[in-house]
Image (tube, rainbow, N blue to C red):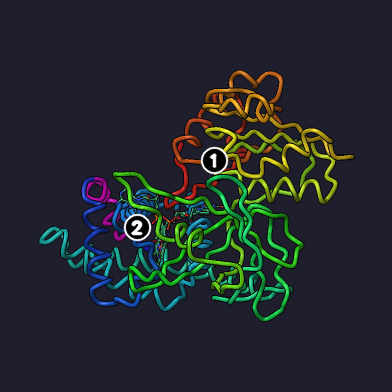
């Protein structure tokens, strides 16, 4: 437990962190990788280049310093971080390495302003935070390994089937190489996959939401091909999955994790709102609700550019045309720029960007659970809209396909 003096010292660094947090975390990563190059593959090297991981860590350290008197308000964020860490195979022994280089970086970046008392206060604060995360992660590791079909760390899977879902999205059906079962994950959770990246001479790991309901012999992920633009290079792992990973190949997979999942302990309506490839966790939730014959009222709202990039379109069309017995499913599909062929096929309901206001009065039940997944800007906008429409923020759940969660 931190004493008052230590807490005051940590709080006093808030203005410095607000101004120089990213400089500090940049310095920290460079320092840690120089001493521990073996940790580089554990981190997303694209996020390192774009700075999003430095930003995420700086924000976490700042939030911790700001809330040092009431660290319990950070519990939801810590849950997200712990799940991500476990999915990446972070272990208790890594915390000593991070702690050592974080404290040394505070000293080096702050210079004379970093008194011995301040460094001691931060050392105690770091230990307190690390202990909370290590304990949460220990529980997650234990839960993962104790389930039927569960495991800890990396397990080898065979790509049993590769199926194109749209011009951009391809599904991969992954079967354990050891012939064993896969666990009953919660619909909405993700796995990490680890691939060797020849151009970088190291492995890289990425997370992919499980896009099918639990209870199958395989795990399915559905991956968007991040093709890049003239100003943005192609996505490292997604392009390898699309172009180089074939049926019969092996990939390493971490157990299902994540704090974004369908809450099945209630009977209130469910509203699933997604954009683009953000539909993947919602597809697992939707399948789960259908397969369990849930009596809950379900609304799937999906927005994408046009029919060519609309993942799972055929299956959705089937469900739209031939309603499933005992399932109260309603769907609203937005195409931002529909093609002529989309108009002919009536594959969508509305054109333009998703406007929650225009469907609010007829479609958005106040007592529903709202799940959101898509680009961060899309989620921030929709969370803002839902709050304005009077939806209880505690009933809004969101998943960001990157670092740092969603702040709206
Ligand atoms: C919980 C979770 C669930 C996810 N689920 C899914 C899912 O179901 N399906 C899915 O497709 N993805 C999902 N993702 C995203 C996925 O993990 C990867 O981030 C995604 O596939 C891109 O990885 P990549 O290696 O191909 O691209 P990266 O190499 O990591 O690049 C990411 C993006 O940055 C751009 N970029 C690269 N370099 C630069 C630069 N210097 N400047 C600016 N931009 C740059 C790239 O063009 C690309 O668009 C999920 C992520 C999380 C965290
Ligand atoms: C108290 C200590 C720590 C804090 C506060 C912390 C904080 C964070 C945060 C905020 C994220 C982003 C989560 C997200 O939004 O997805 C993250 C991700 C991550 N953390 Fe930690 N972390 C800590 C310790 C560690 C340790 C010990 C390691 C192991 C060396 C580690 C490795 C990672 C990795 C690899 C990621 C994913 C980012 C990427 O893919 O590049 N962290 N952490």
* Residue drawn at point x = 52 percent, y = 70 percent: 135
Q: Earlier in the sequence, mark 2 or mark 1?
A: 2
What element does badge 2 sit on?
helix
Rendering coords of residue 398 (x, y %): 56, 43
> Which region shows up in magenta?
4-18
Residue ID for mark 1: 276
- Specify the quadrant of the image occupied by residue 153: bottom right
Q: Distance between the residues labelled 2 and 1?
A: 21 Å
Q: Outermost residue, left direction?
A: 112
Answer yes or no: disc 2 within 8 Å of ligand 1: yes
Residue ID for mark 2: 46
Query: 79 above or below 181?
Result: above
Rendering coords of residue 359 (x, y %): 65, 21
Q: How crowded is mark 2: few (under 14 residues within 10 Å), some or many (20 or more)?
A: some
The overriding secondary structure of the stretch rendered in magenta is helix
Query: 3 above or below 151?
Result: above
Q: Outermost residue, right direction?
A: 325
Is 197 within the magenta?
Answer: no
């Amino acid at each position: 437990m931190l004493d008052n003096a230590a807490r005051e010292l940590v709080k006093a660094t808030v203005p410095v962190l607000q101004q120089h947090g990213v400089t500090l975390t940049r310095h920290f990563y460079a320092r840690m990788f120089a001493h521990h190059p073996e940790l580089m593959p554990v981190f997303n090297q694209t996020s390192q280049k774009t700075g999003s991981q430095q930003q995420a860590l700086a924000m976490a350290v700042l939030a911790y310093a700001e809330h040092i008197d009431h660290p319990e308000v950070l519990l939801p964020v810590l849950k997200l971080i712990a799940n991500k860490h476990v999915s990446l195979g972070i272990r208790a022994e890594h915390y000593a390495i991070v702690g050592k280089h974080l404290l040394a970086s505070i000293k080096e970046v702050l210079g004379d302003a970093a008194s011995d008392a301040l460094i001691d206060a931060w050392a105690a604060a770091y230990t307190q935070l690390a202990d909370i995360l290590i304990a949460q992660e220990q529980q997650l590791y234990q839960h993962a390994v104790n389930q039927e079909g569960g495991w800890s760390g990396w397990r080898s899977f065979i790509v049993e089937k590769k199926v194109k879902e749209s011009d951009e999205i391809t599904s991969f059906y992954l079967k354990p190489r050891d012939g064993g079962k896969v666990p009953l994950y919660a619909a909405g959770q993700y796995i990490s996959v680890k691939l060797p990246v020849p151009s970088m001479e190291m492995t890289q790991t990425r997370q992919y939401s499980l896009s099918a309901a639990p209870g199958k012999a395989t795990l399915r992920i559905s991956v968007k091909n991040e093709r890049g633009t003239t100003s943005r290079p192609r996505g490292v792992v997604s392009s390898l999955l699309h172009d180089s990973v074939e049926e019969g190949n092996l990939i390493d997979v971490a157990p299902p994790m994540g704090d974004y999942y369908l809450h099945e302990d209630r009977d209130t309506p469910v509203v699933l709102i997604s954009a683009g490839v953000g539909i993947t966790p919602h597809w697992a939730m939707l399948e789960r609700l259908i397969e369990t014959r849930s009596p809950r009222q379900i609304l799937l709202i999906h927005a994408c550019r046009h029919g060519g990039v609309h993942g799972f379109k055929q299956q959705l069309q089937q469900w739209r045309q031939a309603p499933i017995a005992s399932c109260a499913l309603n769907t609203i599909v937005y195409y931002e720029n529909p093609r002529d062929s989309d108009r002919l096929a009536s594959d969508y309901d509305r054109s333009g960007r998703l406007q929650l206001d225009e469907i609010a009065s007829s479609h958005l039940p106040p007592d529903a659970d709202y799940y959101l997944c898509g680009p961060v800007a899309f989620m921030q906008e929709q969370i803002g809209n839902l709050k304005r429409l009077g939806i209880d923020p505690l009933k809004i759940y969101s998943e960001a396909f990157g670092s740092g969660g969603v702040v709206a």
